Image (cartoon, helix red, strand yellow):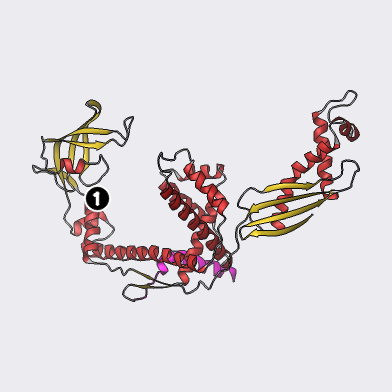
Amino acid sequence: MKSAVENVNPTRVKLTVEVPYEELKPRVDEAYKTIAQQIQIPGFRKGKVPSRLIDQRVGRGYVIETAVNEGLNDYYQQAMVENELTPLSRPEVDITELPSIEKEGEGQLVFTLEVDIRPKVELPEYKGIEVSVEAKEVADEDIEKALDDLRGRFGTLKEVEAPAAADSFVTIDLTASVEGEEVDSAQGLSYQIGSGNMLEGMDEAVTGLSAGEDATFETTLAGGEHAGKAATVKVVINAVKQRELPEANDDFAQLASEFDTIAELRENLAKDAAEGKIVEQGVEARELVLDKLVELVEVPVPASVIDEQIEQHFNAPDAEEGHDTEEHRAEVRENTERAFKNEIILDAVADAEEVGVEQSELIDYIVQTAGQYGMEPNQFAQMLDGAGQVPMLMGEVRRRKALAKVLEFATVTDSNGAAVDLTSFVKPAGEDEAAEVETEEAK
């Protein structure tokens, strides 16, 4: 088989493929066998019909066509591999020549195809990219907030004779009406003012109310059969409660942690806060490094592929009504093109750095992603496997590692000009030790 490539544009090629009859013949023979199983001729058992009779009954042209249809995809895939091309869309195929139907062994199969392909990019010198992030320093307020949050986990609610205020807990009854008709009600609900996990307008309505008082407010229902409808809601306050926090002393430290003293607990909270600041800076630096990469690398974008993804977005079964606007389409196009560029660039970095994906890394990513979707990891993994999405996830993990590698090489300073050490961010605890073990085993 021979194939020739013509570049239509940086992301689309035209291939001309020539398949000699000798290579097509095994498929022609297989086509005769298949057709022999499908037709019945008196005097011959099923599957034993001679080729010459099949030619008389259905025509040799039909046999050739069957053989070509069966082999076309394999020839296409072989041509893509031989020319080191990765398709992004379905090929548009045009058969220009078929073997002779008059004389066995003469002629050949020739077809052309056009297909969108992954563009190949040239990477710049990406080691030593310079970025600046916001300075992050641990303040006493950060430690106190972390301590208060921890105390809050061990706090108790105590009913108070005071008006409800920000962060107060209230026990309430609700009645919702649409156009004067009651459509829903609930009693004994617990709600923390400011949490924002109930109806819009609730905070304003209950703030300042004491037990036994009520208020009415207008809102839009968020769920149920009347979701999206304007409603009048009456809220009755049954009780107002405040959280009582345990005293921050050595006894609390022993109750809430592995430390014996409150001083040790505060020291550990300060360490955690410092690590949290590093993570914040790492996330910021990672995005800035990726932005720099996109600026440095010219990535041609296949318009037809982007168009198809945009249409899938707006025609999805769960697409919201009225969101298909010109402004939104422009936003989706920009995001889709950016995601495409990110993928191409990071795949190129991964190739250059010979980045691989360990099974443990894939499992960790599946567990993390499953949590975002509120699913059990095993259930999520089975769903991905059934949908053939595991390779896609492996690609995502590989690109994340490639970006971490670029960040590892980057020079990061903060807004005060001080160097920022992101070693703990790009190399999580245990990674260095694992690398050392692999090195020792290799010796």
- Judge from the rendering whether residue 197 lies leftward or rightward of residue 63; answer left or right: left
Residue 278 lies, in percent from the top left, at 35, 66
Q: Amino acid at mark 1?
A: Arg
Q: Residues within 10 Å of mark 1 (few under 14, many from 20)?
A: few
Q: Nearer the viewer, residue 116 or 410?
A: 116
Start and end of the magenta stretch? 418-443
Residue 395 lies, in percent from the top left, at 54, 55
Residue 123 sits above or below residue 193 on the image: below
Q: Residue at x 8, y 42 (%)?
A: 161
Q: Residue at x 24, y 50 (%)?
A: 153
Q: Residue at x 10, y 40 (%)?
A: 210
* Residue at which label 1 appears: 153
Residue 282 sits above or below residue 418 on the image: above
Residue 400 is a magenta residue? no
Residue 430 lies, in percent from the top left, at 45, 64
Q: Is residue 424 visible?
A: yes
Q: Is residue 84 visible?
A: no
State whether the magenta stretch is mostly helix, strand or loop: helix
Quarter holding residue 100: top right
